[in-house]
Amino acid sequence: MPDIPSQSSAAAPGPHRQTLLACGAVGATVLTLIALGHDGRRVAQLLALALPALAWLAWPVRSAAMHRTRSVVVWLWAMAFTVDGVTRAYLLDTYQAAPDSSLIQSAAANTNGREAGEYLSMHWRAMLVWSSAVLLAGLVIARSTRLGARGPANLSRWTVVVLSATLLLGSVAYLSKPWRRLHPVMFWTQWSQSVLALRAGWADQQRERDDAMARARAAAPFIAQHGPATVVLVITYSINRDNMALYGYRRATTPRLLSHKAQLEDQMLVMRNAWSVDASTLPSLRNMFNFGLPQDQQPQHVLALARAAGYKIWWMSNHDDVAIEQQHARLADVVDIVNRTPGRAGASLDGELLDCVQEALEDPAERKLIVVHLMGAHPHYSLRFPEGANPFDDTIDDVEQGLKKQGRSAWVRKSRQEYDSALLYHDFVVSETLQLTRKVGRPDGYRAWMYLSDHGHIQWQGNTTDRNVLDADYRWQPPTLPFGVTSFVD
């Protein structure tokens, strides 16, 4: 009588071939659509968040009911990433914007049923194409999930190792808050809440802007100097004076600003001891534009005062931030935002704003205030300069040798190289805004270019000159720091 193999010996030592194909089909489909809507390391982060579903699909189950439940759950899980990727891809293709950009959030908060219907009637062809991609992906994933592993869990050692590593990586992804909030369910839930909050807060923001304009008009601002006037205010982020050659740094990170200083001499004032009084963006800008006064004192806003005095105002930015746009930018007459990817992952270069600066300078308005809001060297540093434009990479100079003597690791030295390269590109952009201010527009009248300054050319009731750094009455107020910073006092 021939030997009849037992159930345990007949079972394959690892997942069946069809199970491997099913996992591969689901993984490839999800990865493809994630890559359409995301870029860089976010693709890897989203894939890590999707891995637990693939691991479950490869783990054998005995019960038919559990098999059906798993098929439904894995399909829903994978489709969440699919719909997220396709939606983001559609927005990138149509508007070059991320879903959490102020452009998209504002449009969603400002729409209604009738407008949504009109939008669909105009864009149904494009939406049909992207919807077809979702449908096709859903069919592939549905067919694949039905082929998940079944039977006793007698897996080979290597299969257990691979599945355990997959689950471990997925667990790490979910434990990391920056990764976890990218999960489609969490992201779109928070997105919906943000849109609702934006819609509810718009009335308050508009009221605050109206109040700011009313206070400005009540202060009776007037032009302190007759004739045309152009004021350019350049605001930037994450620029450390200690890394600027303009202040004695040993790398040539600011050659253009040094050249301007040599040409202009006393006409270009370089302040050594100046830094932000806040550690984050929103309170820092609020202090800058409200003269350092708290909100409960009903402070004046620089832009409101300038408008009340007769200035035409531009706000041009490489940031996408709803709060900044509502609190400050919307006080301007003209708003240009070139970056529609919020947060630190935005790869839009500051040089994209130079055309906007030139157009504003060429405008025939007699009095102009132009606010240029740059990304600067906001992390990630490698995104703040053109690809391949890192002259400090693998350069053995005094800075590199000094870091090695201090025992700095290779990744710290690389980060310093990228930061200094970001400053070098930033030097180009900032210097171009200065050069444009000097050369473009009306040849007559007054021109002022300011870098991280809130000074203006108007007078008003309640003006305090001791807060104006360019006034003879200015009084420096040292900040209260929890520890000493040598470079602030040397």
Image: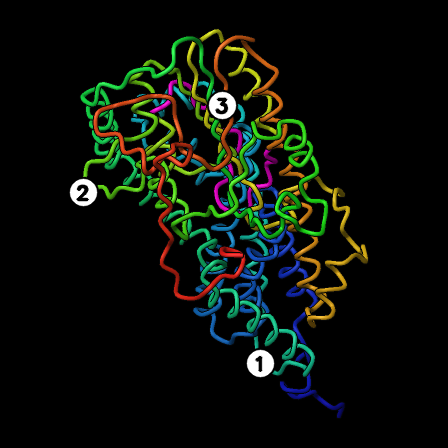
Q: Which SS class for mark 3?
A: strand
Q: Which SS class for mark 2?
A: helix
Q: Which quadrant: the C terminus?
A: bottom right
Expressed as whole percent of the image width and height from the top left, the position of residue 255 reads 70, 38
Viewer-closest of 391 and 1: 391
Residue drawn at x 43%, y 31% as measured from the top left: 103
Q: Which SS class for mark 1?
A: loop
Quadrant position of residue 377: top right
Expressed as whole percent of the image width and height from the top left, the position of residue 284 reads 38, 44
Residue drawn at x 39%, y 15% as measured from the top left: 312
In magenta segment, residue 340: yes
Residue under label 1: 153
Q: Amino acid at mark 1?
A: Ala
Residue under label 3: 448
In magenta segment, residue 391: no
Left or right: 253 as drawn, with respect to 123: right
Quadrant position of residue 101: top left
Alpha-carbon distance for marks 1 and 2? 66 Å
**Over which residues does the magenta segment extend?**
331-350
